[in-house]
Image: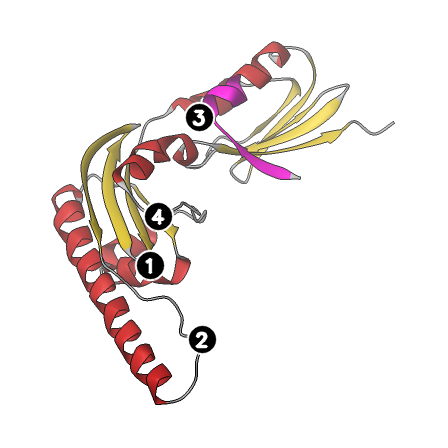
Amino acid sequence: MARYVGRGNVRKRLEPLAGTLGRTSYGGGSARIETVDETLTVTPPFGLSHEGEYASVELGPLFEALAREHTVAAILVRRGGYAVGVFDGERLVASKVGTRFVKGRHKKGGSSANRFRRRREEQERELLDAATATARAVLEPYRDRIEFVALGGDRGAATQVAEQLPWLTARRLERFFDVPDPRQRVLERLPYDLYAAEVSEEPARP
């Protein structure tokens, strides 16, 4: 079963295996490490271009990919708030957060429910408009530097905001970040997850 592990912890986990008997395969953006006891597949978050086969545990190309720093934009949107930021490596170099009240769902029917629904939709549009304006203001100055963009919060809302900046489309990360209500502290903690690698482990076959 795959899970996301911070890059520092991945390195600690694998370092004792370096150079030991086994087999390492690089390809398709992942490293597959087979030892006497187990097989691990590690996929760095921002790609792994190296390809090759080794008759031992060869971790150099994997560690290089994990250690590489990138300029990453983040757009986090949920009902009631949004946060936009730019990270240079793990350092937050630009950010802005905001809030917009959006009503919860109405449990009663009738005309009052319709009025409630229309008001809720209006509030959702206001939230998305504000988040989009913020994303444009924060990210445009870094347009030539941003390599990747991470979306998080509510998938539909964050995607709608990102779609208003078409130049981000080709830079979106496949992983979606399920974060709590977007706040400054949530944004500041995001680098751990941004740089976490996908790791799957399985015991060696008898």
**Does residue 137 sit above or below 15 in this rendering?**
below
Whether residue 107 can be seen here: yes
In the picture of the structure, the residue carrying the numbered disc 3 is: 66
Instruction: State the residue in front, 148 or 161.
Output: 161
**x, y percent for residue 36:** 77, 18
Q: Earlier in the sequence, mark 1 or mark 4?
A: 1
Q: Amino acid at mark 4?
A: Asp
In the picture of the structure, the residue carrying the numbered disc 4 is: 181
Q: Which residue is located at x 48 percent, y 27 percent?
A: 6
Q: Amino acid at mark 2?
A: Lys
Instruction: State the residue in front, 92 or 130.
Output: 130
Q: Which residue is located at x 53 percent, y 22 percent?
A: 10
Marks 3 and 1 sit apart, C-alpha to C-alpha, by 33 Å
Q: Is label 4 or label 3 in front? A: 4
Q: Earlier in the sequence, mark 2 or mark 4?
A: 2
Q: Which residue is located at x 63 percent, y 13 percent?
A: 17
CB under 8 Å between callouts 4 and 3?
no
Q: In the rendered structure, which segment of residues is drawn in magenta?
A: 2-11
In the picture of the structure, the residue carrying the numbered disc 1 is: 79
Q: Is label 2 or label 4 in front? A: 2
| Secondary structure under the numbered disc 1 in the rendered image | loop
Locate residue 22: give its quadrant: top right
Q: Is residue 6 magenta?
A: yes
**Does residue 59 sit above or below 1 in this rendering?**
above
Q: Earlier in the sequence, mark 2 or mark 1?
A: 1
Q: What mark, if any, has residue 107 been given in the picture?
A: 2
| Secondary structure under the numbered disc 3 in the rendered image | helix
Q: Amino acid at mark 3?
A: Leu
